[in-house]
Image (cartoon, rainbow, N blue to C red):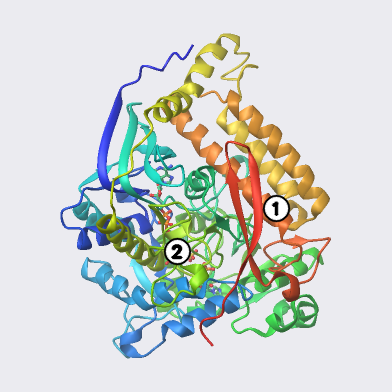
Amino acid sequence: MALFASRKTVVVDCDVLIVGGGFAGCGAAYESRYWGRNLKIVVAEKANIERSGAVAHGLSAINCYMGMRWNENRPEDHVRYARGDLMGLVREDLVFDNARHVDSTVHMFEEWGLPIMKDPATGRYLREGRWQIMIHGESYKPIVAEAAAKAASQVCNRIMVTHLLSDKANPNRVAGAIGFSVRDGRCYVFRAKAVIVAAGGASHIYRPRAIGEGTGRTWYAPWSSTSAYGLLIEAGAKMIQMENRIVLARFKDGYGPVGAWFLLLKSRATNAYGEDYEAARMDGIRALVGKYADVKPMPTCLRNHAMIEEMKAGRGPIYMQTQACLDTPENEEIGWEDFLDMTVGQAVVWASQNIDPKERASELITSEPYVMGSHATCSGAWASGPEDCAPADYQWGYNRMTTIEGLFGAGDTIGGSAHKFSSGSFTEGRLAGKAAVRYLMDMKGAPAVDEAEVRRLAQAIFRPLDTYRVGRNAIVAGTVAPGYLLPLHGLQRLEKLMDEYVGGYSTYYVTSRPLLERGLELLALLREDLEHLGAEDLHQLQRAWELRHRVVTAESVARHTLFREETRWPGYYYRADHPRLDDAGWHVFTASEYDARRNEWRMSKLPVHRIVA
Ligand code: SFD
Ligand code: AMP
């Protein structure tokens, strides 16, 4: 019997539903209002958009800005950069589309009040590197969210979306979404004509290096729970490049980013003996990846690879020689602000370990893997490209529409379009918002949700509360009981198996067919046990659904990794049984479609077209 079956339900009817009010979601809200003046545009957000998503705590740089008004770069240059960094495999139409519009996004951010640092000599934005500009960005998210809140008809904060709803007549068409309020426990049913998923990427799929007293500390936000992929995969959308999960070189224990140090402060990373390990490893890298070794700047994965090899050889710790570059008060201020605006925990590590970065070097390390689509990586949904420059087989309707009719995506959600970062994710949200409005204008008949499906899902959503309530009668200690699995225990099981079998840090990112097949067996057992998740309260119910999204994403990562029989990105992961890059067989995107009814995955290859010379 479902104890919680009679929960109150709130029905929200809208034209455009945006799931997730992070950077891409805010861009989607802003732009869909621009083109759809009279439309009902609703944002459903599991936290509060004022401080939600990966940028909740602020950033110190905008990592995607062309600078076209000063002739600094052309969008085509950015395509070449992203293509080189991703070892040849990007959707060039999508990267180009983001790049040609991203500057206008950044100019709006400045207009809305974001302080962007200026170069005193030129008056231009202060460049961190060729693509990056420096900001005073602690309040980056509230500034951007304010514009989105003004544009939206309604922002439903604290609503965790758990499933997409399909059209009663056409299972391949979206009709809305369902979820619950993490505050009052009401069930929310959104009936929408178009849906834009902008629910962010994934931390905590792999066991993080930080454990014990540091539990929960990760580079990507711990609340980035991969709903962008979980929702889409379960709905049957075609996904690509899910094996392209990213490993980051970061300051050890605090996960402080390195970009400002390498690019702006011109800091050097060395092994424990002060040697430049990247240069020394070039021949070995060439043997693995051939011509890609000479791409400039050196691809992110290859920089990781050099560091990993050096650590394996026992020549760690790797050090960022901070003391050599903090030689002026200006540089010292930039160094500290870099972390205080973006990764406060790193400054706390310095304080707690008696490290004065002006006096001594700081350790670097490679992180656990993350699954996302907006950094130096491009996992996510296969999306239709822009009308004017996408090749025919990348174009089946509206820009940024997935393979499900009426379902759009942006930011981490969309695959193939790497190097978007915050500004590019907002820009992609704008592109998706504009396309969704056009889709509505062309629409002949609205979709209808299936009431039986809504009832079935509403029961399933709250079941972990029932399971806990019944199971707690057998509690042996604290909240532990034999009759249910707690979300935290499920999460730890997931992280451990992904780490050990699917190329986490504890194997130096190495995996192989036998390891992946065993990992998939264990994942299947975990999925069975998820039917017995128990949630003590609404907070734990949210954790339960986040875990479900993480597990289905993890399975997708494992299946894609198994499918791609080569090592395309050494430094992100290694297929020990296929240790080299193989352009003849694998200069393609890997794709998957999950059939939830049959619990079957269909894998395929998709072509990589070159659009920019
Ligand atoms: O240096 C649901 N990022 C950086 N970008 C930059 O431009 N400059 C930097 O300096 C960057 N660095 C950086 C970055 C991120 C982090 C965590 C650090 C440092 C420490 C990357 C950007 O932040 C990233 O590219 C974008 O934020 C991606 O945008 P988007 O929209 O795809 O994801 P989001 O912003 O996290 O938003 C997701 C939203 O969805 C909500 N949500 N809502 C309802 N129901 C559900 N089921 C939901 N699941 C999630 C979330 O709450 C969130 O609001 S550096 O390291 O590279
Ligand atoms: P990070 O702080 O590592 O997230 O990097 C921020 C930006 O700088 C991203 O665009 C990175 O790709 C870029 N970046 C970081 N380190 C380097 C480097 N050593 N060489 C070139 N680009 C880098």
Give the position of the C terminus as an image quadrant.
Answer: bottom right
* Tally of marks: 2
Q: What residue does disc 2 label?
A: 396
Q: Is residue 127 above or below residue 243?
A: below
Q: Nearer the viewer, residue 136 or 354?
A: 136
Residue type at tag 2? Trp
Left-right relation of 405 to 87: left
- Image coords of residue 298 (percent x, y): 63, 79
Measuring from the top left, give residue 56's x and y in whole percent.
Answer: 38, 53
Residue labelled with disc 1:
504
Quarter assignment of residue 524:
top right
- Residue 454 lies in quadrant: top left
Mark 2 close to ligand 1, CB under 8 Å: no
Taking the view exactly as shown, the residue that stands out farthest to the top is: 473
Residue at image position (49%, 70%) is 419
Left or right of 197? Residue 89 is right
Quadrant for ligand 1 reads bottom left
Amino acid type at circle 1 is: Gly
